[in-house]
Image (cartoon, rainbow, N blue to C red):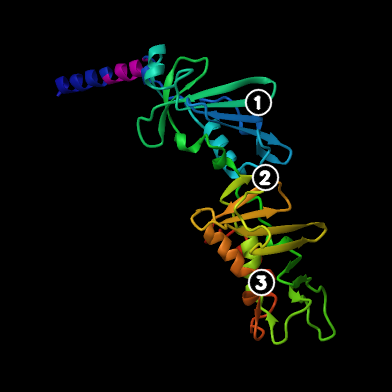
Amino acid sequence: MEKTIRILALVLAVQVVLAVGLQFSGPTLSPATEAEPLVSKSSDQVSKITIADAEDQQVKLKRTDSGWTLTDSGFPADPDKVSQLLKQLTGLSEGEVVAQTESARERFKVAGENFKRRITLHTGGQDPVRLYLGTSPGKDRVHARVEGRNPIQVVQFGTYDAPVKVADWQDQGVLQIPSDRIAGLELNGLKLQRKESKQGADKDGQTGQPAGWQASKTPEGKVLQPSAMRQLTQQLATFRFDSVLGAEQPGGYDWDQPVLELTVQRGKEDPVQYRLAKKSVKEDQTKYALKSSTHKEYFSLATPTATQLIEAASAKALLGPEAEKESPDQSGEQDKGRDQAPSSGS
């Protein structure tokens, strides 16, 4: 019995010694430290972004008082896309180091002249940060190197999130007008006005008379349809252009006989005028072009987007043989809930 106790005591002593030794052992057994950020900048610090590939294609973005724009043209950039890119870049953490030599830079395509993407973040008076992105070892993973540093690391990023085509960064929703800002419309000889809601009680004790739409003149037997007005204002609030055709009026379209002319009143702001023309050459894939008074450029519209807008603005859609049974308040209430829904023709 005493022998057994001595053995157990010896085992316990050995365990204590091992535990103490492990506590003070080398760095490989110390708690893991949090990975350092790869790009030591915050999104708010970045004032310019340049994205390039090795074939001399590049996109330049600049932060302005009114938001992000494409530097060369001044055209608005997609704010959500720019914000997402900055969030991804400034959120990158240092990853597994796969190499550090100059020869490896060529192999992983993160060298000064050999790369998949070179992203430069400018931060005012400070030195810019230049990030090289190269080959991909797997889905949403890429080899990366920061200029001035040797380590080539694997980070979580996809080069498709940093395209080098200008068209991929243009804000395709700049022609939209939120439906709650549309105060009136003029089209097809019709003048349509949004009625303001009444506050307080009327002579019958009814309170909160909601907003609706009224037409100054309608053909005999025709009545303005509330659901059609909802559809039209929704189209104006959600449609997106397909591409920018440039500041010069594109040829081949019937601008003298546009398929749609529409003026949108925006309260105290200047009215917006739209002219939509159809391509006179049937074989051409770009069938519709749009000009808005708010921009110097001409825009192409995808055929489904254009036809839906034309149909929604037609007299056939807006005027019916009799009033709909629903109350006019829904034209104001439901618009607000649908502004954020993307058009099916976008």
- Sequence-first disc among 1 and 2: 1
Marks 3 and 1, Cα distance to the nearest angstrom?
A: 47 Å
Q: Quadrant of the C terminus?
A: bottom right
Query: Relative to 196, is 275 above or below?
Result: above
Rendering quarter of residue 123: top right
At label 2, the amino acid type is: Glu
The residue that appears at 56% across and 60% down in the rendered structure is: 305
For the residue carrying disc 1, how many other residues have a C-alpha within 10 Å: few (<14), some (14-19), or many (20+)?
some
Per the rendering, the mark at residue 123 is 1
Q: Is residue 261 left or right of residue 204?
A: left
Report x, y in % for residue 207: 78, 78
Q: Give the magenta part as a residue range.
A: 15-25
- Residue, disc 2: 248
At label 1, the amino acid type is: Thr
Q: Is residue 203 left or right of residue 333?
A: right
Per the rendering, the mark at residue 337 is none
Report x, y in % for residue 112: 49, 17
Q: Is residue 109 left or right of residue 259?
A: left
Nearest the viewer among 52 and 94 is: 52
For numbered disc 1, what is the local secondary structure? Answer: strand
Marks 2 and 3, Cα distance to the nearest angstrom?
A: 33 Å
For numbered disc 3, what is the local secondary structure? Answer: helix
- Residue, disc 3: 229
Report x, y in % for residue 147: 52, 18
Marks 1 and 2, Cα distance to the nearest angstrom?
A: 35 Å
For the residue carrying disc 3, how many other residues have a C-alpha within 10 Å: few (<14), some (14-19), or many (20+)?
many
